[in-house]
Image (cartoon, rainbow, N blue to C red):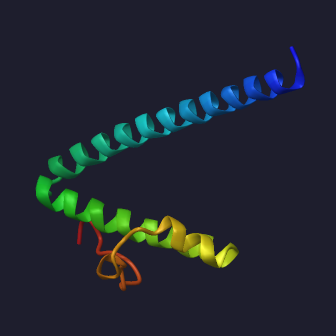
Amino acid sequence: MNDDQELERLQQALRLSEQQAKFRHNASHFALFSIVKELAIRSGLSETDFHRHFDLRRHHYHARSLEKIEDLHPHRAAEFDDRPLADVPTDPGFPPLFP
């Protein structure tokens, strides 16, 4: 096997490893999401309210992640942020799930 073939093999292995990590992360996310959703509904929160709270928190943490990227690489954050300006949260946080 020559160097180019070895490099291609390693790049394919890296892509596969990245895909596997992404699948595991997604599976973990959906498992946790379903557990928390079930607990919230059993505690009296409507499914609609749960989804509203989830979206508020998702937007909040997305914005915080972009801020961290911006601190390190100011121009890179804009490349990752495809939200319209109206969707950028201006709140410092989010309301509690159970007031």
Name the foreground residue: 48 vs 17.
Answer: 17
Q: Give x and y (percent) for residue 49.
A: 15, 62
Residue that appears at 43% across and 39% down? 26
Rendered view: 10 above or below 86: above
> Which residue lies at the image location 56% right of the left edge and 71% below the top edge?
77
Q: Is residue 80 above or below residue 38?
A: below
Q: Residue furthest top?
A: 1
Residue 92 location (% of width, % of height): 41, 83
Name the image quarter holding the N terminus.
Answer: top right
- Residue at the (21%, 57%) spot, across then down: 51
The structure residue drawn at horizontal position 29% and vertical position 75%, both measured from the top left corner, is: 95
Q: Nearer the viewer, residue 96 or 21?
A: 21
Task: Pick the residue in front: 60 or 66.
Answer: 66
Q: Could you tell whether 50 is left or right of 82 in the image?
A: left
Q: Tell me: 70 left or right of 50.
A: right
Image quadrant where residue 29 sits: top left
Answer with left or right where residue 66 lies relative to residue 86: right
